[in-house]
Amino acid sequence: VFIKKIHQTIPFSRRFPTRNRIWMKISEVKQALSFDLVTLGNVCVDVIVGIESFPINASKHQNLRHSVELSAGGSCNALIVASRLGLNVAPLDYIGNDSMGEFITLSLESSQISTEYLISDRNRNTLNCVILVDSFGNHTFIASNEQPTAHFDIKLASSNIIHTNCLLPSHQNAIANSKVLLIDGYALDELSFETIHEALAISALNSTRFWFDPQATTDHLVRTNPKLLDYLLSKANTLILTQEEIKEFFKASNESKVFENLHSVSDFFEVYQDLHCVVVKCGALGCDAYLRSTESVIHVDGVQLKESEIKDTAGAGDSFLAGFMTGLLETTFTIYDSMQLANAAGAAGCMNSGTGMKLATLNQIQNCAEFYRNPVLNQFLKRIE
C-alpha cells in the first residue's frame, strides 16, 4: 500500500531519478496543484490616502478626501484581476504574523485565491506601501522597496546549480507546476540572488514561462544593478514595460557596456535569446507588442474613457498585465485579442479608487471590452462569468 500510494502521486519519470529507490513518508507525498500564474515576492498592504492635490508642501495642510483605506497590493493586484478573469493563481511569499498579514490573507481568500504558499513568519513585518491619490486620480507611492539590493553572483549565474535551498519545497513545487512565474521589480528588494536563481532554474527545467515587469525600479536597476537586470532579461520569456521605462534602456545604451547593444526594441530579441515578447504600455493610447516571430510592431488603441470615469490609475498597469496574460493563455485568442483584453482590463482598473479588491471587476472589463466590438473577446468574457 505504501509503494502504491507513492506511485499514484509521483510521475514515473520522478520515481527513480538515479535508478535508486527513494523512500518517502506518505505525509510528505502530495499531489501538486496546477496554476496558471504564481508570483514571487512583493505581497504588501497598500495604505491609500486621498489628498486634495499635489504637490504636498510642508506646513501647508490639506483636507483628507476620504478615510484612509487598506488594500491588498503589490503582486496581489495582478493576482486578483487574473483570478477574476478565470485564472488559477497564487502568491509565493512571506508575510508577518501581524494584523496586516492577516488582512492580506483574508482579502485574497475572499477572491478565491490560494494562500497556502503565503507563509506567516513572526520574525518579519508585512510590507506596506502608502499611496497618495488626488482628486484627479494622480498618485505617488511611499515605500521602502523601490531600490533592488540583490547582489548578482556571476559564479552562481554561470553554474549548473539548480537548488540553493532558499525556496521552500512547496514554493519549488508551485513554480514547477505553473504555466507562468511573474517577478516584478519591487520584489527584488526582498529576494536574494540565490532565491531568484533557484526560482528561474526551476522555471526553465519545468517549461514555466518567466514574465518580468521591472516597473518603477527600472531606472535604479539600469544605473546601479545592470548585471542583475541583464541576468533577469536573459531568462525572461515576456517583458512588460512602459514607454518611460523602455527609454531608460535606450539611454543606458550610451552609458553602460551591459546595454550598449540596445538601441531599439528589436535589439532585445538579438541580445536575449529566450525573450519572445516585449509589451509596451502606452497609457490611454493603448499598447504596442513586439514578437520574436514578427518583424513589425503591433499596436492596439486604448479604450477611450470619459474624464469623469477615471478615478485612480494606481494598479491599472497590474490589471493590464493580468489581462494580457489571460489572453496569451487562452488558446482561441490571437495577439490582437490578448492586447484588447489587456487594454480593457487596464482601463477598467482606472474606474475605481483604490487597488487590490477595488480594481477592475469582471463586469467593468466586459463593458470596456465592448469598445472593440470583438465577438471572440466578448464570448470569452461571457463564458467566464
Image (cartoon, rainbow, N blue to C red):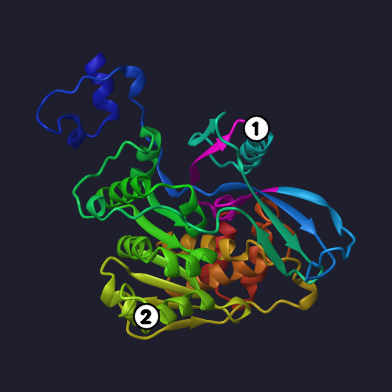
Residue that appears at 37% across and 80% down = 253
When the figure is inspected, residue 351 is found, relative to residue 173, above or below; the finding is below
Residue 145 horizontal/vertical position (percent):
55, 54
Q: Quadrant of residue 366?
A: bottom right
The magenta stretch is: 71-97
Q: Mark 2 highlights which residue? A: 253
> Decide: marks 2, 1 in contact (CB < 8 A)?
no
Q: Mark 1 highlights which residue? A: 98
Judged from this view, the residue extending furthest toward the top is 1
Q: Mark 1 is on which residue type? A: Asp
**In the rendered structure, does residue 90 fall within the stretch colored magenta?**
yes
Q: CA distance from mark 2 to mark 1?
A: 44 Å
Compare marks 2 and 1 and give the one earlier in the sequence.
1
Q: Mark 2 is on which residue type? A: Ser
Q: Secondary structure at mark 1?
A: loop
**162 sits to left or right of 45:** left
